[in-house]
Image (spheres, coloured by chain):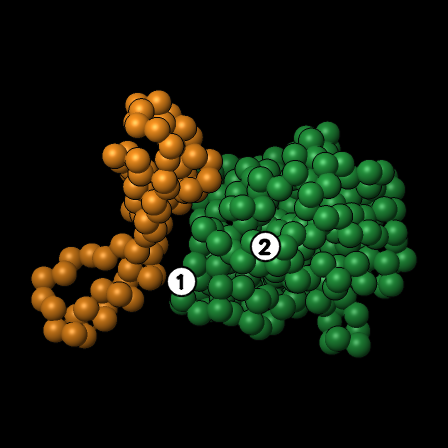
Amino acid sequence: MKAKIVITPKKAVLDPQGKTVQAALEQMGYEGVIDVHVGKYLEVDLEGDDAEAWKPKIEEACHKLFSNPVIEDYEFTIE
Amino acid sequence: MHFSVLQFPGSNCDQDCIHVLSDVLGHQANYLWHKEESLGNTDAVVVPGGFSYGDYLRTGSIAQFSPVMNAVKKFASEGGLVMGICNGFQILCETGLLPGALVRNRSLQFRCEQVYLKVPTQDSPYTREIAVEDVIRVPIAHGEGCYFADDETLEKLKANDQILFQYASADGEITDDSNPNGSLLNIAGICNEARNVCGMMPHPERASESILGEEGGLKIFEGMALHFQGAPLVGSKNR
């Protein structure tokens, strides 16, 4: 079983990486790109098959370690 | 006075801090490995700069779970002086001892240069020896020093006089041009509400000897020592 965690910068936090990537996309000729946000992706291999039991633990780890709630949002799935 | 300078895997300004505290200022100063669970008989803690745990995940994010940080949190809650410099500031924010966070410089550049700092208040152990009309020149060296906090936190920092250092021009003006990393309100350093915990991105330990060109940084460490010795504030314009 695997937890898949996506961490993105909060909307209020300026994301210079995203802006730079967006500028590169425009340079490449892609039209219609509204915004780019650069975040992180983590995969955590888990023992057992009880996703519900893991959920609060992964939630806690997201809050305390994987993300910094001051500047980042997170979402995850366990499957 | 007895200082402890923390060492994490990847700390690299620890020796500079020890040198200034012991060789220049004549205090006792020892290294404290991050696996230690006790601070011993320390009077003040310095969390030095560097790249603790390789800056993996986020700057300072892994270091906050080192055993020594539990002792630092307890020490801080009892009023002990804790100062974080550069990566040390990032660690103190991640630990929750200071509000806000340090994010990637707005320019995306690693900035390594001299900056001028203005001190909005002398009401702290760290700024008590620096007049509010003065500026000090101190180097920075960081890629992630852009101070961010939500509006509510910024208002609180202002209301409580917790902003201790702001990037300024040579004549003390707080301008966008003098802001090297995009920090909100030009914030270079802050303290907690109780005023015993301080974090700053610039490196005062690299500006503490005339032979190195600058010694304005010394005033910060001298202020900590005077505070510890119970010396009254002289010439403070705030309180």
Chain B painted colour: green
Chain A painted colour: orange
Residue type indicated by callout 1: Arg
Residue A16, x across and y down, in percent: 34, 61
User: Front-most of B164 and B1?
Assistant: B1
| Res B8 visible | yes
Disc marking residue B37:
none
Q: Name the residue under label 2.
A: B52
Circle 2 Cα neighbour tier, 10 Å, few/some/many (<14 / 14–19 / ≥20): many
Please report, as a chain letter, where disc 2 is located.
B
Helix, strand or loop at label 2? It is: helix
| B235 with respect to B114 (left or right) | right
Residue at the extreme left of the image, as rendered: A31
Is the residue B105 above or below the residue B37 in the image? below
Residue type indicated by callout 2: Ser
Please report, as a chain letter, where disc 1 is located.
B
Is the residue B185 above or below the residue B116 in the image? above
Q: Which of marks 1 and 2 is in front?
A: 2
Helix, strand or loop at label 1? It is: loop
